[in-house]
Amino acid sequence: MVQKINPTSNYYELLGVSVKATTAEIKDAYRRLALELHPDVNADPDDHERFRLVADAYRVLLDPQMRKKYDTMRLLSFGWPITRLRDTVANPVAFNQLMNKVGTMLAVASGIVRKPVGEPGRDMTLGTTLSFWESFQGVERRFEYKREIDCADCKGSGFAKVAVCEICHGAGRLRSDFMPMVGKRCPRCAAKGWIGVENCATCSGTGRVEDYHGVMVKIPAGVQHAGRVRLSKQGEGGRHGGKDGDLVINVTVLLDGLATRQGNDLIMPVDVDIRTAALGGVAAAEFPHGRLKFRVPEASWNHRRLRVPGRGFRDPKTGQTGDFFAVLSIAIPDALPSDDRELARQYLHAVKGPEDAPAGLFRDELVKRFAT
Ligand SMILES: [Zn+2]
Ligand SMILES: [Zn+2]
């Protein structure tokens, strides 16, 4: 059943009640008029039409939700009689002027333009490349990118001007005899309760605009190659108040010429002189972020792995830290006298692991030669 707005008066005037009338007063008024105008008791065709309009008015004003919408529409028309609003609606230019005055915001605030159900924005993916040592220490990086968001000028509706649907009066649904409580979807406005009158110029009616967005991202220490950093709500904007998507950053970590990572352990060769390796002492690993000193036991062999607990990669998920393994690289300096170099060579040849007894053979001689 298509409802028409009374062409001569508003619903309150039709029923002869005030705009503040209670439900009981509206019911009383309707009963009185129905007795007077009902086609069964009244033969005047004008009264038949009036009875139809009175029935319309009664139906709208009795339903608190419909009444609220109707009231809002009346207010939107600045107290003009409904006829004048109707004429205005029929005249697009005048109507636009009217809606300009009223504004979409008022329509939204007053509940005529119902907020559509929000739709979440999609996640967006960007990539970034870190050096080995940046991944060890963590890094802050700025990302600038384009993302799609709801047009602020039209709140994502795509329309600069909207009108209350003249078919359902903003209810979005039409009552029918079959479904008196629910009604069917209004075909004119697709159950929105309003219709667009003029496209938004900012977004050309799409409801969406491109947003040039920048964000500082903390990429945590210990991030793995092919790891991901997720930033909540920095992706594509949600539609109509839906949740914004996330920004996902795929991390590539470059290899280092010397150091490697195994799990959360950091492994790196460290140069040690022959004296320190043979007699014990202190060596230092040189990292881009500083040096790390560690003890070298006596009688160490080439490529011996020495563990420094808790100085490896920090696991960004668990917060635990791996170990540092120094792989001794024992150098024989060219500057040594040839006898000494020969002795060093013999040492390295003889001492290849923990099972090799070092001291007996070389210690005294090494001490004598190198312990200066
Ligand atoms: Zn409608
Ligand atoms: Zn827009």
Image (cartoon, helix red, strand yellow):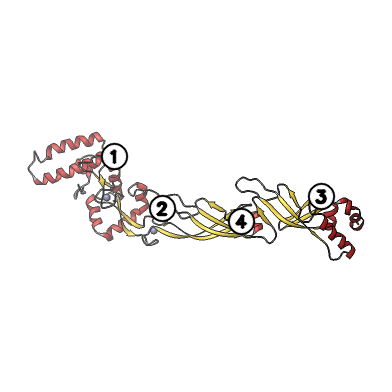
Kindly identify the amino acid type of the residue bearing the numbered disc 2. Arg
**Disc 3 versus disc 1: nearer the observer:** 3
Which residue is depicted at the point 34% across and 48% down? 114
Instruction: Please report whichever mark, 3 or 4, sits nearer to the chain's N-terminal start.
Output: 4
Counting from the top left corner in percent of width and height, residue 280 is at 84, 51
Instruction: Please report whichever mark, 3 or 2, sits nearer to the chain's N-terminal start.
Output: 2
Q: Is residue 34 above or below residue 263?
A: above
Ligand 2 within 8 Å of disc 3? The answer is no
Whether residue 337 is visible, yes or no, is no
Q: Residue furthest left?
A: 43
Marking on residue 64 = 1
Distance from Cα at disc 2 to Cα at disc 4: 30 Å
Check disc 4 and report the residue beneath it.
140
Relative horizontal placement of residue 213, taking residue 4 as reference (left or right): right
Which residue is depicted at the point 15% across and 38% down? 34
Instruction: Please report whichever mark, 2 or 4, sits nearer to the chain's N-terminal start.
Output: 4
Marking on residue 297 = 3
Distance from Cα at disc 3 to Cα at disc 1: 88 Å
**Disc 3 versus disc 4: nearer the observer:** 3
Task: Decide: few, some or many residues near mark 2? Use Cα within 10 Å; few <14, some 14-19, many ≥20.
Answer: many
SS type, badge 1: helix
Counting from the top left corner in percent of width and height, residue 144 is at 53, 60
Check disc 2 and report the residue beneath it.
239
